[in-house]
Amino acid sequence: MSVPEYKQLRRSYGFDEVAIVPGDVTINPDQTNIELKVDSFTCSIPIIASAMDAVTDVNFAILMSKMGGVAVLNLEGVQTRYDDPGEVLADIARASNAEATPLLQKVYSQPIKESLIAERIQAIKKAGATCAVSVAPANAKRFAPIVAEAGADIFVVQSTVTSARHISKSYRGLSFSELRQLVGIPIIVGNCVSYTACLELARTGVSGVLVGVGPGAACTSREVLGIGVPQITATMDCAAARDQYLAESGRYVPVITDGGFRKGGDLCKAFAAGADAVMLGSIFAQAKEAPGLGYHWGMANPHPVLPRGTRIKVGTAGTLEQILYGPTSVTDGSQNLVGALRTAMGICGAFNVAEMHKAEMVFAPAITTEGKSWQLMRA
């Protein structure tokens, strides 16, 4: 007896399951243009440090800006709850695995001090750096005037999953078009993983969309909630929405792939899949200058009733400059990420990121191990 189909499933792909096909023409890597433009804001490299307490503090944001990128400061983390966040971060790093989550829940139960929001933003701006800040949708309208008055450059509204249509009995949903008028600076919104959600977010007038649900090294949303789409497929679907919105409006809204990156090859694949920029967490948590002191945790980890993250030990791999630009003595692709992207673009004959979007990709589940028997034995 034939069984009627209840639901269709389509195949989706992550970084390890695809490869980029070299182009018919190659160019010198130093001739590539990898600028990121978000409205009137321009960044010389399309790499963003995530809004996570183990990654971005005031000093890291300043350093990242000087190196051509941008780091996002979380306005709901330890930086705005404590006058001396360094002491709290040290306590988190010293905690045992069993103590980590209860400690994080306690740490993040302290109230946010609105005076510290302006203070942190002004410290970044005083150093001449680009200042990007992040809040959850629930606090966006409350903190927006403070952010605007303090002089932030980019406002990120971010949660595990963000949609343009939020239904609630208790409060009126956040209007991104109204928020844009309120702050008067570029607004990046996320996260999403589907064509329709990305298209609807773009239509609200936001300046950029973050793509990725649950792929991060310290995130457990996929285990706890069962929700997520592998990053190659999510990026391609959202890039299709970006292009559709461009065709109907004439306005370009960058797609920023957020999470799941381990090596330079993953970054290159994200751009070939359609990303305009990438947001990195655990990779930067390994920087000597990162505030997490060799540890990393998801910002949903301290949730009082349903933690969706875990503290992980990532260690210290090198300086931020080494991770971004080298020089590097490691061969695993974890450093000189900018060099890797430029080289891949040169091999594909892509002068800019838009041309990299056109690179051919193939399904390649064995690409990382094909012919690597000696390397696997050494490991």
Image (cartoon, helix red, strand yellow):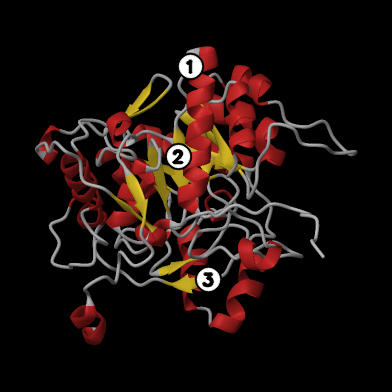
**Quadrant of the drawing holding the C terminus:** bottom left
* Residue plotted at (31% across, 44% down): 64
Foreground of the two, 249 or 97: 249
Evaluate if marks 2 and 1 touch, with contact meaning CB atoms under 8 Å apart: no
Q: CA distance from mark 2 to mark 1?
A: 16 Å
Q: Give the residue pinned by disc 3.
A: 311
The three-letter amino acid code for the residue at tag 2 is Ile
Q: Give the residue pinned by disc 1.
A: 251
Report helix, strand or loop for mark 3.
Answer: loop
Numbered circle sitting on residue 256: 2
Is 284 left or right of 184, judged from the image as shown? left
Give whichever of discs 1 and 3 has the lower sequence position: 1
Give whichever of discs 2 and 1 has the lower sequence position: 1
Evaluate if marks 1 and 3 touch, with contact meaning CB atoms under 8 Å apart: no
Foreground of the two, 228 or 9: 9
Residue 7: x and y in percent read 74, 53
